[in-house]
Amino acid sequence: MSIAEEQPKPYEWMTYALRAMKAEDVSVVGEIDREAFPTTWPPTPLLRELKNSIARYLVAYDQREKGEISLTQSFASPEVPEPLLWRLARGLLWRLKTNCPVRVPYKTLLGFVGIWFLSDEAHITSIATRTNFRGQGIGELLLIGAIELALERGSQSITLEVRVSNMVAQSLYEKYNFVETGIRKRYYVDNHEDARIMAIDSIHTTSYNSHFRGLVKAHQLRWGYTTRDLN
């Protein structure tokens, strides 16, 4: 296949993208955090994390924009949570019997990943995707973003913890060459489940970079090309 043939066509662009988390994202990211980890207590102090010099958070979002639609109608997709202000405005217009078309932003946050940078190690503290959007390559996109950010910041290794029962997540991590380095007994407070400690020892070797680039390309070919603004 020639380089020209490998260039993305418009319809091959993934509708999801990554960017750094902002203060205005905190409430929605908190909802995703509670949805993914309902038994975690206390909840992640996201506003404080934004000010933490060793912490970085990335969010995955739907970068599409809706055209003109009626405020008296619901979102076209039942899987997209309807914002409170939208619901109140729609209810008011329904009472006024008004069918007013407006442009509505569709940049919905769908997942996030948190990373702590400790000396030469990047530690993934949490990674989560909205339940209704799982299985669409978003979790893997978040992991790709975390690894790219670790490479950019010069980290030598990446570590994380994962529930021993979460085989789906473990399979994804193993795909990216994470290996088990230990067990944290009774790590999770809700049911005292053990955690597998998984790590990539060196992300700067030629072999790992080749492996990682191949996985990124495979993700693009399956799910589409995407934009990633990590800073």
Image (tube, helix red, strand yellow):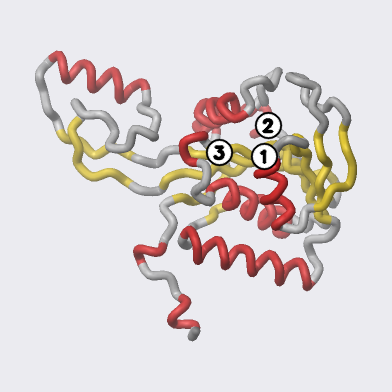
Q: Is residue 201 toward the left or the right of residue 51 in the image?
A: right
**Residue 118: % across, % down:** 83, 44
**Residue 89: % across, % down:** 25, 21
- Within-10-Å neighbours for mark 1: few <14, some 14–19, many 20+: many
Q: Residue at x 80, y 22 (%)?
A: 192
The front one of 123 and 195 is 195
- Within-10-Å neighbours for mark 2: few <14, some 14–19, many 20+: some
**What is the spatial separation of the Cα atoms under label 3 and label 2, in whole angstroms?**
19 Å
The residue pinned by badge 1 equals 114
The residue pinned by badge 2 equals 49
Circle 3: residue type: Thr
Q: Residue at x 51, y 33 (%)?
A: 25
**What is the spatial separation of the Cα atoms under label 1 and label 2, in whole angstroms?**
9 Å
Circle 2: residue type: Glu
Circle 1: residue type: Gly
Helix, strand or loop for disc 3: strand
Helix, strand or loop for disc 2: helix
**Decide: marks 1, 3 in contact (CB < 8 A)?**
no
Q: Is residue 129 visible?
A: yes
